[in-house]
């Protein structure tokens, strides 16, 4: 009996050692080919901009091309599901945003993936706020005037988003809840068309990613009245935060992070994490991110995992209060 137990223990130990050795060997040879970043957002969007900046630097580090694969549709679900079902070998990584990972679990009745169980967080890449932008013809100069106009026209004003679960959508719902107003949500297939329609006057306002709308605000095509971050943006320092503008508790920050399919070897995850953090700390990457109004982060995997959980909890409360639900 003792011999059996001893033999079993040795077998398990050898198996474990073999697994560790295989993982370490895989990490030493990884990447032996190109790496794919699945980005569930269209070309020209904020996550697309930032993913390409990071991919270029990692391509330099690894000597293998990091390919950006924009897989759009269904509020980011198609690309996210594709990543979840990819082989967990380190060659397919998800560059995702707040919506599919932290919001849609509360907004939709059912998802084709589990944002917690199907992925291993690697690192939070960047944070970027939205800018509250209006069509210039709207008789509004600040947030208080916007609230007053919305209250005098309940259900008659419209804001756009690039789809349910985006920070554009969440910002609008939070504005409705905190402002005690009803501005109707108009969901677009792409944030690009939403921006075009706001510039053209088809919808009244948007809460859009700063990197995308900053040029339109500076040119006068859109009127920016506030930013949704806790602090003012250095690129548009004249715009107050929503909190400064009289809406305590209004903070919405779009975030972008790297996640891998569950089961990806730990040694590979550690290498991706270390090299991503190193890339985010290079002067050229930081400068490029900051020109996109994005703050590079690069935290620990456990910190990113805790952040995701806190975001899931936060937005579940907002969605419940707003009554927003998609079946």
Image: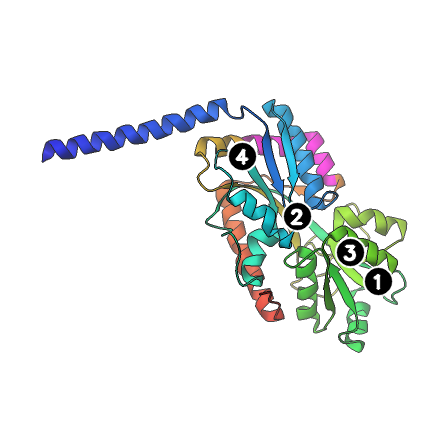
Q: Which residue is mark 2?
A: 72
* Percent x, y of residue 314: 56, 60
Label 2 to label 4: alpha-carbon separation: 25 Å
Q: Earlier in the sequence, mark 4 or mark 3?
A: 3
Of circles 4 and 3, which is in front?
3
Q: Which x, y percent locates residue 217? A: 84, 52
Is the residue marked by circle 2 packed among few (<14), some (14-19), or many (20+) residues within 10 Å?
some
Quarter of the image with the C terminus is: bottom right
Image quadrant where residue 11 sits:
top left
Magenta stretch: give its range.
Answer: 273-290
Camera-side mark, 1 or 2: 2
Give the overall secondary structure of the magenta segment.
helix
Q: How many marks?
A: 4
- Whether residue 223 is visible here, answered yes or no, is no
Say which residue label 4 marks: 273
Looking at the image, is mark 1 or mark 3 earlier in the sequence? 3
Pick whichever of labels 2 and 3 is earlier in the sequence.
Answer: 2
In the rendered image, residue 47, in percent from the top left (x then y), is placed at: 68, 44
Find the distance from the CA under tag 2 to the CA under tag 3: 16 Å
State how far apart marks 4 and 1 are (Cα). Answer: 43 Å
Mark 3 — residue? 194
Viewer-proximal residue, 147 or 38?
38
Circles 4, 3 touching at the beta carbon (< 8 Å): no
Mark 4 against mark 1, which lies toward the viewer? 1
| As drawn, 54 above or below 152 | above
């Amino acid at each position: 009996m003792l011999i059996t137990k001893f033999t079993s223990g040795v077998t398990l130990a050898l198996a474990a050692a073999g697994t560790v050795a295989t993982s370490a060997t895989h990490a030493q040879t990884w990447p032996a080919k190109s790496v794919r970043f699945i980005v569930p957002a269209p070309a020209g969007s904020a996550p697309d901009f930032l993913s390409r900046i990071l991919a270029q630097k990692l391509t330099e580090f690894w000597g293998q091309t990091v390919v950006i694969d924009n897989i759009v549709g269904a509020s980011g679900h198609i690309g996210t599901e594709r990543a979840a079902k990819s082989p967990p070998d380190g060659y397919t990584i998800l560059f995702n945003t707040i919506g599919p990972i932290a919001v849609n679990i509360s907004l939709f009745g059912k998802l084709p993936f589990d944002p917690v169980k199907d992925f291993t967080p690697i690192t939070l890449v960047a944070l970027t706020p939205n800018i509250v932008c209006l069509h210039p013809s709207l008789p509004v100069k600040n947030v208080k005037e916007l609230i007053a106009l919305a209250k005098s026209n309940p259900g008659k004003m419209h804001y756009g988003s690039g789809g349910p679960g985006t920070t554009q959508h969440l910002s609008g719902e939070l504005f409705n809840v905190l402002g005690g107003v009803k501005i109707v949500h108009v969901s677009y297939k792409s944030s690009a068309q939403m921006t075009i329609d706001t510039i053209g006057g088809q919808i009244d306002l948007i809460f859009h990613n700063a990197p995308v709308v900053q040029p339109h605000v500076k040119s006068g095509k859109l009127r920016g009245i506030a930013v949704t971050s806790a602090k003012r943006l250095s690129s548009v320092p004249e715009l107050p935060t929503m909190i400064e503008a009289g809406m305590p508790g209004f903070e919405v920050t779009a975030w972008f992070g790297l996640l891998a399919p569950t089961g990806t070897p730990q040694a590979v995850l550690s290498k991706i994490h270390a090299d991503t953090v190193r890339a985010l700390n290079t002067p050229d990457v930081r400068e490029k991110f900051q020109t996109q109004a994005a703050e590079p982060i690069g935290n620990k995997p456990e910190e990113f995992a805790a952040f995701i959980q806190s975001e899931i909890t936060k937005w579940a409360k907002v969605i419940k209060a707003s009554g927003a639900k998609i079946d």
